[in-house]
Amino acid sequence: MKTKKIARTLIPAATLICLTMTQSAYSYQSPEAQNFMSGFNSFKNKDYRTAIKQLATLLEQPESQLRELALVFLARAYFKDGNTDESAYLLHLWKQEFPDSSLRTTLEQDLLRETAKIDIATILAKKEQERIARERAEQERLAAIKAEEERKAREMAEAERIAREKAAAERLANHKAAIYATVSTPKLLLSLPSNDLEAVAGKEMSVLLTVTNPGILPDSFALAAAFPSGWQAHFEVDGKQAEKTAEIAPGSSVSAMLRIKPPKTILEGQQLSLPIRLTSQIAGDRPISSEIAMVASAPIVRAVVKKVDSVDGDSARAQCQVSVLNVGSADASTLNIKLTHSASHVPEPAGSAPFSIVSGGAIKIGQLNLASGGLQEFLINFKVKDSNNKGISCKAELSLE
């Protein structure tokens, strides 16, 4: 029996000796061993409060290999420092976790005696309340941290939103300013052909337009032509009729084709100024107007009529010779001639031009094509149906369809 008791006493002492020897034998110690030895040395030096602080760190490590020693020496240190309740609680834990511990013989008799008087149930209840309070406090602390983080996140998100909206508003304002500048300087937005344009009466023509986005945001532009009555016009983009351009990147350009068909009523040499209007999708409150300048090209046709009251001395026959000339710069492609004659004369089919009878006193020579600088002459034969006639009268009227 004595041998067993001596052996139990020697085992913890041997553990402490090993830890002490380890400190001098090796230059490296684990943090766990260092913490315990610091606390142990403070305990030996009767600096119990320092020992408590140093040894308590080991209890925060549930898997510590020195937990058994830490519980015992912490209980002793608390007892030495006058905190019998905490000492009793630690001894209770030690007995529960290490029921076969050989460290019982290291405990002072007065420690065992005094702690035995403590109502451990009361202490355990108090510890449970403290644990619940700590957990609640920790939950409140974490909740407060989370709430603060969420608040900061909301504030940051709101600040970022405001910054984005401010930047977007500034970009929008700068873009509109660039569009507004083209109101007085349309060429910044719209480029027209540099060569002189010629509008030929009744003939479709194409005008290439280049639309450039002078702003800093992608934008598209509505296209409109405010041409006088009788003009036919529409816009085409990528070969298809369109009323607006596609979206244009800042500084980029797209092409649009303006198809125009002038009326046949325009006059040769007339100076034309045809308005077009572009409207930004973003800055639509200030449309940009420009004008396409062109010179009208049209036929100028005239007719000269010469009458012959008798043919080869035959007073029963008469003739009208019509000379038609075009002195304009454009061809007269659909020229009609209406020849009015006296009712006493009947036109005969034989002649140099086919005709159709419009009424008893008029015939029509239609769909002539007279090139610019061209001259055509026609001879129409008539038969006299009234012997009392006083000669034939002829008058030519020209029209373009």
Image: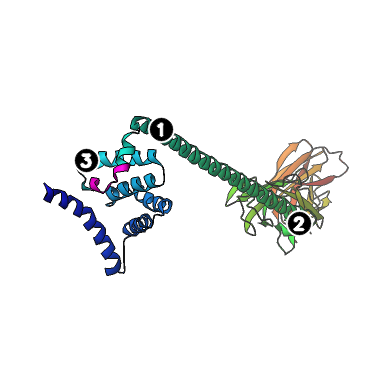
Q: Of circles 3 and 2, which is in front?
A: 3
Q: Which residues are magenta?
A: 103-110
Q: Residue at x 29, y 43 (%)?
A: 109
Give the mark nearest the N terminus, 2 or 1.
Answer: 1
Q: Residue at x 55, y 42 (%)?
A: 148
Q: CA distance from mark 3 to mark 2?
A: 98 Å
Label 3 crowding class (10 Å Cα cut-off): few <14, some 14-19, many 20+?
Answer: few
- Expressed as whole percent of the image width and height from the top left, the position of residue 173 reads 72, 50
Report whether residue 218 is seen.
yes
The residue under label 3 is which amino acid type? Answer: Pro
- Expressed as whole percent of the image width and height from the top left, the position of residue 321 reads 78, 52
Q: Indicate whether residue 332 is drawn in magenta.
A: no
| Residue nearest the viewer, comparing 393 with 63 | 63
Residues marked 2 and 1 touching at CB (< 8 Å):
no
The residue under label 1 is which amino acid type? Answer: Lys
| Residue nearest the viewer, comparing 341 with 61 | 61
In the picture, the disc for residue 186 is 2
| Residue nearest the viewer, comparing 77 with 182 | 77
Give the mark nearest the N terminus, 3 or 2.
Answer: 3
In which image quadrant can residue 92 be found? top left
> Residue beneath label 1, please?
126
Callout 3: SS: loop
Indicate whether 191 appears above or below 366: below
Determine whether, in the image, residue 118 is placed left or right of residue 359: left
Q: CA distance from mark 2 to mark 1?
A: 87 Å
Give the mark nearest the N terminus, 3 or 1.
Answer: 3
Q: Of circles 2 and 1, which is in front?
A: 1
> Residue beneath label 3, please?
99
| Residue nearest the viewer, comparing 201 with 106 | 106
